[in-house]
Image (cartoon, rainbow, N blue to C red):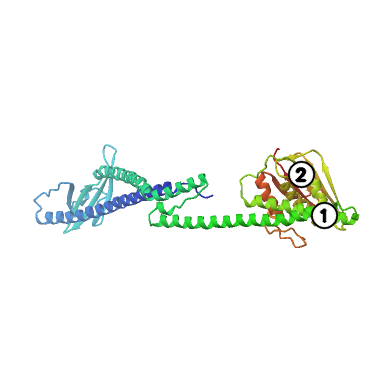
Amino acid sequence: MLSRRKLRFRLIVSFALFGFGLSALFAFSALNIRARVEDQLVTATLLDEVDNLNRQVHEHPERQPKFGIVEAWTWSDRTIYKAPLEWQHLDNGVHDVSETGSDGKTRHYKLAVEHKNGIYSFLRYDVSRDELSKQQLLISVIGAVFLFGLLSLTIGLWLSRKVLKPVSELAARLRDFRKAGKAEPLAPHFADDEVGELALALDEYAARLTAMVERDREFNSDVSHELRTPLAVIASTTELLQGSPDLTDKLRERLKRIERSSRQATELIEALLLLSRAERRGPTRGETTEVGKVAADVIESQRPQMRDKPLDIELAVNEPVSVNAPASVLSVALTNLIGNAIKYTLEGLVRVEIGNGRIEVIDTGPGIKPEDAERLFQRGVRGEGAGGSGAGLGLAIVRRLCDLYGWQVSMRPRSDANGAIASLVFEPA
């Protein structure tokens, strides 16, 4: 899942974490370097002082050397046994030793040892006294880290407001345009920088999109106007011909088929025009349509598609269902659902059931796979074994019409026999 954090929040957090991490790294490095340098300096100093002690005792045995911050002892080869036992076997150099005093506290020392000219020289430096200063330094460094972290956060807040001000203004203008439903040029309100280039690109994209939508609207209006005229001529001519007294039953039936086809074409044009307007809600104009009546008309119009197949089609109205939608929209949806059932069913029965706020088309065809049920409503997707010259757009149009009017359409295989069930659920009238 993608993060929904605002860009400014992420910038502030990133800047604060960067400042805190950099300060912590600097503090850790400073403490580590200080400890290493201090240890090296103390070791080098003790070595020099113990060498100096040994030389003074050798040259002036009658003098007592004095030191300020270290303690000194000297013994000869004959008196070394007086030294602490753990000191007697130490090699020349500086050693870390620990001793427990009479008060029970353990103290840490650095002990410099030099055996030269028959003289054992020892210098002891108490490093425990440095622990307090190290603790104070550590507390000071931690405080400095948090102080720099707070400073980084403050700077991040200020910088984010300054840096993201053009981006925030651009986002605010886009939100206002979306609420108003009318876009105005963005580029004149911004400087000639990256945000200005983005605003200019959005203006160009909006202009192209507006022009494209306008061309589509004009095309749809022109096509609908040009198609309705010949369809109206066909319908009126068919009506006049049906009134002729010398028509045979066969010719009368053919004229009825022509009349139904012209009516279906008109309904399809109206439905496509509704979809092309991209409205959030399908217009009803106060129309209430009886689902059973439309289904009966659609079934009669689709009977010629059965040809000579051993196929029956029946309508069962278990409960009257009405919808607040034009009859043309419902007719287009049912024509696709019922027409598909007739098309894919080679023999058996196509049953249309109405009731409980829905209509179901049940067939005895080859059926569908459960995993393909939703995919069939995509544009260009046709069912297995599809024949004819269809483009796989019928169910896609049905899905768009249902989305427009708040209906639910679905396909599923039958569980009791071969075939499929197309279900169209309406919202309450």
**Residue type at the position of mark 1:** Arg
For the residue pair 23 and 100, the one nearer the viewer reads as 23
- Reading the image, the residue beneath label 1 is 257
Please tell me whether residue 320 is drawn above or below residue 164 in the rendered image: above
**What's the residue at 49%, 50% (across, down)?**
183
Q: Residue 128 at what x, y percent from top left?
A: 26, 44
Q: Any mark on residue 359, and which?
A: 2
- Does residue 27 appear in this view? yes
Nearer to me, 256 or 40: 256
Residue projecting furthest to the top: 103
Mark 1 falls on what kind of element? Answer: helix
Determine whether 132 is above or below 264 in the image.
above
Q: Residue at x 81, y 52 (%)?
A: 239
Quarter where residue 345 is shown: bottom right
Residue 71: % across, % down: 18, 47
When asked about the image quadrant of residue 391, the answer is bottom right
Whole-number angstrom distance, CA of label 1 to CA of label 2:
25 Å
